[in-house]
Image: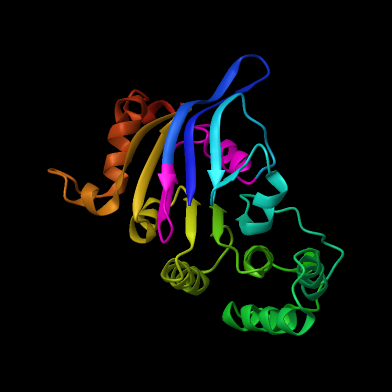
Amino acid sequence: MISVKNLTKKYPGDTTALNDISFEIGNGEIGGYIGTNGAGKSTTVKILIGVLDFDSGSAFVNGIDVRKEPLEVKRIVGYVPETGNLFNSLSGQEYLEFIGTIRDIEENSLSRRINNFAELFEFKDQLNESIGNLSKGNQQKVLITSALLHDPDVLFFDEPLNGLDANSIFIFQDLVAYLVSKNKTILYCSHILDTIEKVSTKIIFIDKGKIILDTKTGDLKNTKNYTNLESLFRSLNGEKEAGKYSYESLFD
């Protein structure tokens, strides 16, 4: 479970990234966390995985206080960042073995899991290639695998589909559904709204550091005049702002 209460984070220069936000995502739930660039999504995630401090409020992951026990939080979570910093000189096999060692996964179990994920995402033939020589999509598959190897209870996905081909996206969506069936808790950040709408059990909309929508996906779809998440996003984000530009003048 993820529990955030009255969380505030300010950056130097008195920039408020998060302004008194609160939300919960229970076991077996996927919270689709949406908003424009700079809305506060990545800041929230970095706080919840224990790598960024905050000014006030509280944040708990499976009952663990993120501020007091950040190392304990790191042990139970899996994190796919928006941009991954992989060791490009290592092969995918070497990198995943390194991650498995850090996660204290038994050697035989680790070997099986690496092979299983490589078969699932179809990068087994590239396991021994240097990560730096892999395509962006295969690098992303290695990154996703590294986040899931230790079978974490809580998962944070920040634009996890970057670089993936259509088939791999389908596989990832099916995998997410399986993880939810195992009662995992997932916070899923993405700009791909149709994917968020399909996989999420609840939608959390953050704008300029404030939560402006937090509702079950099913309840949202039953709302009068609701058509899809993209239309809702446009209306909540102020479509008139986009409409103020004269596109005809772009090429003057």
Q: Position of residue 42 (x, y in %)?
A: 57, 40
Taking 216 as reference, is 89 left or right? right
Q: Position of residue 248 (x, y in %)?
A: 37, 30
The foreground one among 203 and 185 is 185
- Identify whether 192 is placed above or below 114: above
- Identify whether 230 is placed above or below 152: above
The reply to whether residue 160 is in sight is no
Taking 19 as reference, is 110 left or right? right
Taking 202 as reference, is 139 left or right? right
The foreground one among 173 and 191 is 173
Within the magenta stretch, is there residue 186?
A: no
Specify start and end residues of the magenta stretch as a single range: 24-49
Q: Position of residue 69 (x, y in %)?
A: 68, 43
- Identify whether 122 is placed above or below 67: below
The foreground one among 233 and 252 is 233
Name which quarter of the figure residue 130 lies in: bottom right
The foreground one among 2 and 147 is 2
Name which quarter of the figure residue 246 lies in: top left
The residue positioned 62% from the left and 29% from the top of the image is: 54
The reply to whether residue 173 is in sight is yes
